[in-house]
Image: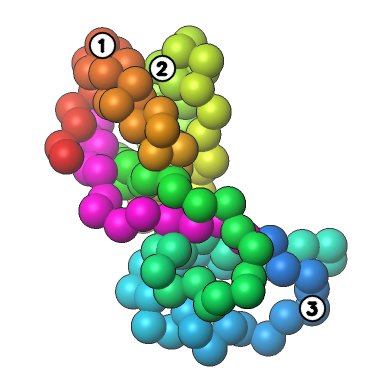
């Protein structure tokens, strides 16, 4: 399993639903959106977040590569090393990949613990 550190610095924000799709996201390149009956969550490169919107800043993202979408245990394999180190994470799954977000202040610790767990990390 390979983990590629994406260059972007992400922000995570919560808006009140229902929300139309934010126009400002269309230029973000990479972003994640989830809407439920009580929240509208967005993860995107923080330079695309409009002024005046409250968000949780400075998250880094590892893209999990070289795994099948139906492979068993992927989330456990990327979560356990961070849990063992006492580091929190935010995880998003898509059809083809998983994305693991860690606070930038914990980035080096996350990389170190992934390497200890013998996961291939590309920075």
Q: Is residue 4 magenta?
A: yes
Q: Main secondary structure of the magenta part?
A: strand
- Binning the other alpha carbons within 10 Å of mark 3 as few (below 14), some (14 to 19) or many (20 upward) gives few
According to the image, label 2 marks what residue?
81
According to the image, label 1 marks what residue?
116
- Binning the other alpha carbons within 10 Å of mark 1 as few (below 14), some (14 to 19) or many (20 upward) gives few
- Binning the other alpha carbons within 10 Å of mark 2 as few (below 14), some (14 to 19) or many (20 upward) gives many
Secondary structure at badge 2 equals helix
In this picture, residue 103 sits left or right of residue 63: right
What residue is at 34 percent from the left and 32 percent from the top? 107
- Residue 19: percent from the left, percent from the top? 73, 80
- Residue 18: percent from the left, percent from the top? 79, 78
Residues drawn in magenta? 1-13
- Residue 2: percent from the left, percent from the top? 22, 35
**Going from the N terminus, do you reach mark 3 or mark 2 first?**
3
Q: In this view, does 33 lie above or below 60?
A: below
Secondary structure at badge 3 equals loop
Q: In this view, does 44 lie above or below 5?
A: below
Q: Is residue 100 magenta?
A: no
Judge whether residue 69 can be spotted in this image.
Answer: no
What residue is at 79 percent from the left and 73 percent from the top? 17
**Pointers 1 and 2 in contact (C-beta within 8 Å):** yes
């Amino acid at each position: 399993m390979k983990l590629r550190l994406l260059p972007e610095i992400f922000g995570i924000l919560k808006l009140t639903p229902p929300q139309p799709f934010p126009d400002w996201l269309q230029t973000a390149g990479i972003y994640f959106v989830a809407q439920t009956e009580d929240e509208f969550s967005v993860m995107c490169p923080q330079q695309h977040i409009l002024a005046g919107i409250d968000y949780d800043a400075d998250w880094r993202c590892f893209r999990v590569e070289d795994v099948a979408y139906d492979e068993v245990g992927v989330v456990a394999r990327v979560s356990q090393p961070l849990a063992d180190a006492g580091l929190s994470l935010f995880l998003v799954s898509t059809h083809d990949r998983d994305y693991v977000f860690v606070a930038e202040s914990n980035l080096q610790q996350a990389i170190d613990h992934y390497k200890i767990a013998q996961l291939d990390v590309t920075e």
